[in-house]
Amino acid sequence: MPEKSCCGFSVKMIYACSGASDTGEIADRAARRIRNEKAGFMACLVGIGGGVDDQLEKARAASTILVIDGCETGCGKTIFEQAGFDRFHHLRLNDLGLQRGESPVTEERIQLVAEEGKKLLSA
């Protein structure tokens, strides 16, 4: 259940740039794990990039946004910046030592990213 705030509910949103690589899959599965552990709600990154009104409204209403990028390209971060957002946490798997094409999907890697993501959502 979302945290209560003075104005109703405070929602933490999670967006993953899943890409087509091993690190993209890790980013996506970590975001889903965070959601499943009820640390935030996962939403559609493409909806932000596509300018879908209800997706943008949800993001604007969020108390905290976490964007997880699978690689150094940083597509998720760029999507949020181009949509006019300047307050969000950005987690790039490269910063955790995971390199695209060199990081097979494992439970340990998914858990590493999920734990880092939960820390950012709690900050």
Image (cartoon, rainbow, N blue to C red):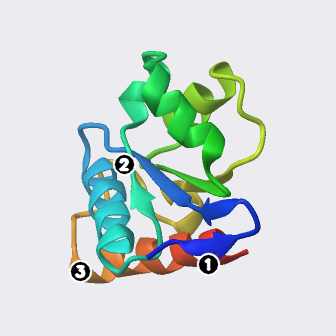
Of the pair 40 and 114, the residue shown nearer to us: 40
Vertical order, 17 against 32 (above or below):
above
Tell me the element at label 2: loop
Q: Amino acid at mark 2?
A: Arg
Looking at the image, can residue 73 be seen?
Answer: no
Q: Which mark is residue 119?
A: 1
Vertical relation: 90 (above or below) 34: above
103 in relation to 51, above or below:
below
Q: Residue at x 35, y 68 (%)?
A: 35
Kindly report the distance in space between the C-alpha atoms of the residues bearing marks 2 and 1: 23 Å
Local SS, label 1: helix
The three-letter code of the residue at mark 1 reads Lys
Q: Amino acid at mark 3?
A: Glu
Label 1 vs label 3, nearer the camera: 1
Which residue is tagged 2? 100
User: Distance from label 3 to label 2 (Cα)?
Assistant: 17 Å
